[in-house]
Amino acid sequence: MASIERIRPEGLISSPAFSHVAIVPPGATTIYVGGQNAVDAAGSLVGDGDIAAQSVRSLENAKTALAAAGATLDDVVQWTVLFVDGSDIAAGYGAIASALASDEPALVTAARVAGLGVPGALVEISAIAAVMR
């Protein structure tokens, strides 16, 4: 079975937190996970004002969404992580870094934004994954 090839080319920074390039094999099914905030099943915000708690819950929600499509964290090709400007990105990313760490980590895009759609949300995580079916 073919798998996702993640590349960290010489000449670019080498980090255990992310790769620079991903090649998805032919025949893979692409899964898109929309932005996940730190909300529970009823839509209530979890971890009000706590970027670490919100990051953990947002990632848990993303894992639940991936599982619903038959995917895991290992199948993620790219993460997009949005942090509300002024929040402690080191604390937020630090709370989820070990869950995302891998010998061949996914690509990661992180950005600061003015605000998110969920009032009080400090982080939003989305993903693109690929699985062989």
Image (tube, rainbow, N blue to C red):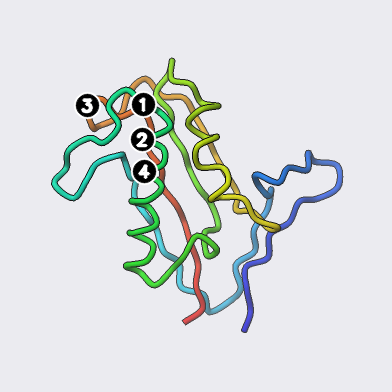
Label 3 secondary element: loop
Is 31 displayed left or right of 16 in the figure? left
Tag 1 secondary structure? loop
Which mark lies nearer to you, 4 or 3? 4
Q: Toward the viewer: 24 or 18?
A: 18
Precedes in sequence: disc 3 or disc 1: 1
User: Looking at numbered disc 2 in the image, what kind of residue is underneath it?
Assistant: Gln
Q: Quadrant of residue 25?
A: bottom right
The residue labelled by disc 4 is: 58
What amino acid type should be assigned to the residue bearing mark 4? Ser
Q: Which residue is mark 1?
A: 50
Q: CA distance from mark 4 to mark 2?
A: 6 Å
Q: Are marks 4 and 2 in contact (CB under 8 Å)?
A: yes
Query: Would you say 41 lies left or right of 62 here?
Result: left
**Of the image marks 2 and 3, the number of the one nearer the N terminus:** 2
- Label 4's element? helix
Q: Are marks 1 and 2 in contact (CB under 8 Å)?
A: yes
Q: Residue 7 at what x, y percent from top left?
A: 73, 56
Q: Mark 2 or mark 3, which is nearer to you? A: 2
Rounded to the nearest whole Å, what is the CA distance between mark 2 and mark 3?
13 Å
Q: How many marks?
A: 4
Mark 4–mark 1 distance (CA, rounded to whole Å): 12 Å
From the image, tell me which residue sits under label 3.
Answer: 119
What SS does tag 2 mark?
Answer: helix
Q: Which mark is residue 54?
A: 2
